[in-house]
Amino acid sequence: MGAWQPLPEELAPEVRHFVEQLRLLKDRTGLSLVALGARTAYSKSSWQRYLNATQPPPEQAVVALCRVVGEDPERFIVRWELAVQAWPREPAPAGPQGAPVRGAVPAAGGPAPGADGSGEAYEEAPTLPWWDAPEEQSRSARRSRLSPARGSSGRLLLYVALLGLVLLGLVAVVGAVTLG
């Protein structure tokens, strides 16, 4: 912990500050990158890329790290938003006739979003475990995504009630067969 490789000099101040704060959070966990990956559903190699500023982390990775540490993710998400806007990007690889390759992720180290006139900004594509997947992906849903889902307990109660009814019916059928 704490023996981080130096960040590239050409990083924007917002990116540098965010990654330094992310590193401090990771150090507070006391976990190795492998253990952190197991606790957050993001791999060791993903965390290496995020913590060495070679790739911006998805928003949900930041939220997952905050949850492991017990921190309120809100202030880190604000820093994430600022860093992602300033994150260095390379243009997407070109396909036939110079068209960008669909789904290609530009590598870090190139011009900032829109520097080539494209206006293309970083798009978040998180890989989430099923238990953390937000029900909607809009910006207005951020508040609900930062706190545990509230609607899932009602769904669980419905499933338990249905299971109870099925078991009750099964007991009634078995009782009727054994008595008849």
Image: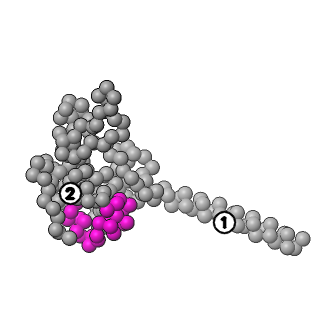
Residue 104's spot in the image, x, y percent? 33, 40
Q: Up-down: is 42 above or below 172?
A: above
Name the residue beneath numbered marker 1: 164
Q: Amino acid at mark 2?
A: Asn
What stretch of residues is rendered in magenta? 22-44
Residue sitting at 85 percent across and 73 percent down?
Answer: 178
> Where is mark 2, residue-wise?
52
Q: Position of residue 54 (x, y in %)?
A: 22, 52
Residue 146 lies left or right of residue 87; in this view the side is right
Residue plotted at (20% across, 57% down):
52
Mark 1 surroundings: few (<14), some (14-19) or many (≥20) residues within 10 A? few
**Viewed as shown, does residue 21 lie left or right of 66?**
left
User: Quadrant of the rendered structure where residue 174 is?
Assistant: bottom right
User: What residue is shown at x 53% (from left), y 58% (from top)?
Assistant: 154
Question: Is residue 5 within the magenta segment?
Answer: no
141 vs 29, left or right, is: right
- Expressed as whole percent of the image width and height from the top left, the position of residue 23 reads 21, 62
Q: Rounded to the nearest whole Å, what is the CA distance between mark 2 and mark 1?
A: 51 Å
Furthest residue in direction front, as rendered: 96
Q: How is the image coloured?
A: one colour
Instruction: Tell me: 2 left or right of 154.
Output: left
The spot of residue 128 in percent (x, y) is 40, 55
| Image: 92 above or below 83 | above
Q: Amino acid at mark 1?
A: Gly
Q: Secondary structure at mark 1?
A: helix
Report helix, strand or loop for mark 2: loop
Is the magenta region chiefly helix, strand or loop? Answer: helix
Q: Quadrant of the C terminus?
A: bottom right
Query: Residue farthest to the right?
Result: 180
Give whichever of 79, 120 is nearer the camera. Answer: 120
Q: Which of the 4 image quarters holds residue 179? A: bottom right
- Residue 150 visible? The answer is no
